[in-house]
Amino acid sequence: MSSNAEKLYNLIAKDSKKKQSLFLIALTNPKLALEKICEIGEELDILVTKDEVIEYLSTIDDDATKMWLVKARGGL
């Protein structure tokens, strides 16, 4: 069974406008991007917490995602 964070990630990944918007936000404010992801989840009735999003994203084997996670957690 997939998690809500995974379901939400897959939906966002298929929506180029949402994906691009989140990417641009994440470049300058990764924590705000996390908040926006949770807001999108609320809109779609797929409730997630910031921690659930971070936990799921940490399982993705992608260097850009890993770098973003470091920033979102307050590093760099």
Image (cartoon, helix red, strand yellow):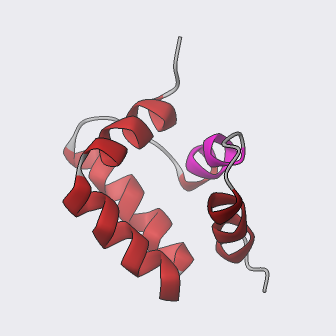
Relative to 61, residue 27 above or below? below
Residue at x 63%, y 40% (from the top left corner): 56
Q: How many marks?
A: 0
Query: In the orientation shown, which residue stands out farthest toward the right?
Result: 75
56 w.r.t. 69: above or below: above
The answer to whether 58 appears left or right of 43 in the picture is: right
Give the x, y percent position of residue 65: 63, 59
Give the position of the C terminus as an image quadrant: bottom right
53 falls in the magenta region: yes
| Percent position of residue 66, x then y | 71, 60
Q: Nearer the viewer, residue 63 or 51?
A: 63
**Residue 38 x/y as whole percent:** 40, 54
Q: Main secondary structure of the magenta part?
A: helix
Residue farthest top in this picture: 1
Q: Residue at the location (20% across, 62% down)?
A: 17
Q: Position of residue 1 (x, y in %)?
A: 53, 10
Residue range of the region highlighted in magenta in the rendering: 52-58
Q: Measuring 37% from the left and 68% from the top, which residue is drawn there?
A: 22
Image quarter of residue 47:
top left
Closer-to-camera residue (24/34):
24
Q: Taking the image as drawn, is residue 16 in sight?
A: yes
- Left or right: residue 16 versus residue 49 is left
Residue 47 showing in the rendered view: no
Task: Give the residue displayed 49% in from the left and 37% down from the top.
Answer: 5
> In the image, is residue 52 above or below residue 1?
below
Q: Is residue 10 covered in magenta?
A: no
